[in-house]
């Protein structure tokens, strides 16, 4: 307002309704003359944006206008969505309560390390730094924790491992239900841990000691327990500990242990026969299958009309033998054998050429034999070659009879089990054995970038055991998250049902729904399909912003989460309705 010669003049924005059209927005001037008010239109603001009109109205009212940066400042943004989702699943599973009934500092640190293992698997020192760069530290109140506290929490967790595994077994393992078991190893960086020894290295890191660990899961592959062994421990020798754990600690009166042919050897099975309430499902080695063919117990003509048949053999009394033939497996074995034979011949050709060039100082037969031995050991096909050395020259040829004999068994495998037909049908026996692939998937997630159990750096035996158990708990959360988010991932949501009814021997075929999902790369509601890693990244894009509001005289600080995208909201909804066996967690 301005006052000229005693008259009051006012300027304002007037919005006048216009029937059937947009309202007229006018800048007007009003002036009082005696008892009358005279109005005059200065201009039409109809083509102005709404934001500019609102600013003009505030200016005409006498408000002080300041730039938004001076009024509201975002001081920090921390990734929050992925932290929220994993914590939500942990609480849904009741894993925090399984660790300790009452909340305490050690429990919060363990939960934080489990979450960090899935977000950014790294050392304990790096974990205590990184979780301050997300909302994890503030969510659990562990932002100021140092590395010594984390190692103390690992000791606290290790002391509770037996009790936690017992609760997981009570939730997931049922009497008479198959229990899957397999062994793997990871390489160790260091020299101080007594568990680190040289043994059968599965990681391909030559020259480094390893640590062996065996994982027990239910029949669907959900992890339940883990046991750690020195690196020179053979796989079969770990079976006794698992039997004792199942019977004594988990108190299962009847259990069927499923292990591969390298785990449940003939000696281990002889031991299991003397264990009451313990059954097994395994498979025969190729040498045993060849003996069955030679003695006539397994006739190859059985597979002319079918791909599965039960057979009997006096060499396996009290056992059921289920012979299977997979044509795709036969083709793959033939292809791989031919590739190994060709690679061996190429290397032998080089050895022969090197021997032929040595005319002045010819190689001795022993030297040539040593080179040939290295080649044959590398490709593992020595039985298919006959070779000799004459006058400093190397001669070889393929043993076609040996190759034909081995090719007869291509695609054939035999499952062996102690379970009677009344308890386990032949197709179900094959299905149970093939479910060992679920334990292999667990090892891939544990060793891969999901959890990164390796390399192992901890210097003491207890810290190594606690680290591996912590990784198992992290994979337990990941396993359930993958189940809950199957609709958002490149997962076949019908797979559990398909496994129960499809032919267990024939090559598996994906369902129509997952084929459609992969072709369109979208969910049924139009959301983009993600991998596990990219879904976590997308969830992490939902941030928690620390904002400061007000001028110098008065400042207000508050946290504001960004709005969830439809995909982020869907991920949270799927966790809230996820069914957890044996829990009474509220939705």
Image (cartoon, grey):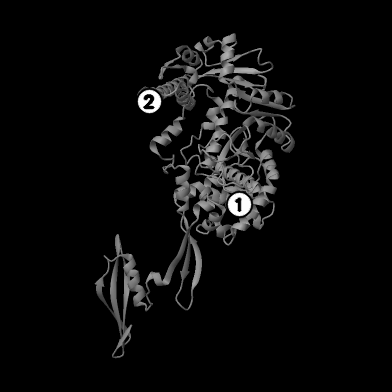
Give how far across and how far down residue 565 sits, in percent: 44, 51
Q: Which residue is mark 2?
A: 354
Q: At 68% from the left edge and 45% from the top edge, which residue is drawn? A: 161
Front in this rendered view, residue 531 or 387? 387
Front in this rendered view, residue 334 or 393? 393
Give how far across and how far down residue 356 sits, in percent: 36, 22
Q: Number of marks in the image?
A: 2
Q: Quadrant of residue 294?
A: top right
Residue lying farthest bottom? 5
Element type at mark 2: helix
**Rendered image: mark on residue 111:** 1
Query: Could you give the CA–CA distance between mark 2 and mark 1, rounded to whole angstroms?
Result: 61 Å
Residue lying farthest left? 43
Give how far across and how far down residue 533 sits, in percent: 47, 45
Front in this rendered view, residue 150 or 488? 150
- Above or below 171: residue 547: below
Of labels 2 and 1, the one closer to you: 2
């Amino acid at each position: 307002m301005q006052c000229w010669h005693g008259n009051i003049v006012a300027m304002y924005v007037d919005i006048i309704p216009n029937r059937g059209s947009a309202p007229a927005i006018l800048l007007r001037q009003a002036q009082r003359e005696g008892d009358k008010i005279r109005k005059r239109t200065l201009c039409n603001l109809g083509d102005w944006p709404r934001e500019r009109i609102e600013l003009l109205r505030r200016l005409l009212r006498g408000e002080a206008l300041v730039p938004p940066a001076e009024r509201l400042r975002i001081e920090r943004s921390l990734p929050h969505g992925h932290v929220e989702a994993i914590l939500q699943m942990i609480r849904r599973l009741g894993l925090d309560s399984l660790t300790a009934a009452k909340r305490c500092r050690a429990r919060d640190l363990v939960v934080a390390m489990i979450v960090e293992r899935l977000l950014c698997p790294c050392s304990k020192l790096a974990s205590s730094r990184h979780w301050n760069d997300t909302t994890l530290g503030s969510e659990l109140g562990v932002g100021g924790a140092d590395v010594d506290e984390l190692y103390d929490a690992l000791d606290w967790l290790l002391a509770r491992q037996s009790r936690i595994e017992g609760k997981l077994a009570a939730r997931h393992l049922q009497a008479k239900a198959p229990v899957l078991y397999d062994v793997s190893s990871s390489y160790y960086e260091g020299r101080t841990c007594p568990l680190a020894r040289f043994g059968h290295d599965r990681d391909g890191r030559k020259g480094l000691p390893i640590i062996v660990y065996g994982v027990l899961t239910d029949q669907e592959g959900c992890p339940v327990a883990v046991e750690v062994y020195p690196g020179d421990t053979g796989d079969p020798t770990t079976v006794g500990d698992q039997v004792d754990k199942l019977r004594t600690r988990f108190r299962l009166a009847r259990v069927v242990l499923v292990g591969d042919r390298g785990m449940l050897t003939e000696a281990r099975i002889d031991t299991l026969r003397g264990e009451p309430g313990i059954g097994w499902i395994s498979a025969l080695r190729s040498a045993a299958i060849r003996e069955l063919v030679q003695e006539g117990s397994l006739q190859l003509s059985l597979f002319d009309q079918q791909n599965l048949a039960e057979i009997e053999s006096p060499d396996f009394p009290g056992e059921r033998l289920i012979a299977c033939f997979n044509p795709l497996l036969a083709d793959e074995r033939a292809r791989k054998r031919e590739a190994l034979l060709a690679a061996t011949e190429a290397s032998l050709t080089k050895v022969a050429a090197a021997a032929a060039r040595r005319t002045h100082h010819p190689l001795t037969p022993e030297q040539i034999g040593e080179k040939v031995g290295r080649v044959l050991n590398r490709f593992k096909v020595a039985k298919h070659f006959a070779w000799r050395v004459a006058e400093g020259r190397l001669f070889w040829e393929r043993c076609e009879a040996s190759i034909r004999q081995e090719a007869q068994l291509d695609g054939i495998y035999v499952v062996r089990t102690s379970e009677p037909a009344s308890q386990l049908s032949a197709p179900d026996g094959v299905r149970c054995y093939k479910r060992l692939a679920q334990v292999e998937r667990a090892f891939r997630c544990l060793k891969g970038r999901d959890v990164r159990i390796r390399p192992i750096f901890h210097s003491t035996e207890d810290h190594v055991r606690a680290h591996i158990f912590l990784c198992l708990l992290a994979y337990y959360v990941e396993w359930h998250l993958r189940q809950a988010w199957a609709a958002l991932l490149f997962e076949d949501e019908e797979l559990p049902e398909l496994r129960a009814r499809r032919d267990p021997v024939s090559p598996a075929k994906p369902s129509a729904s997952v084929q459609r999902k992969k072709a369109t790369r979208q969910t049924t509601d139009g959301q983009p399909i993600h991998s596990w890693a990219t879904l976590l990244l997308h969830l992490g894009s939902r941030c928690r912003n620390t904002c400061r509001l007000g001028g110098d005289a008065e400042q207000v600080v508050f946290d504001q989460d960004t709005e969830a995208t439809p995909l982020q909201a869907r991920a949270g909804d799927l966790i809230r309705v996820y069914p957890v066996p044996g829990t009474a967690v509220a939705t």
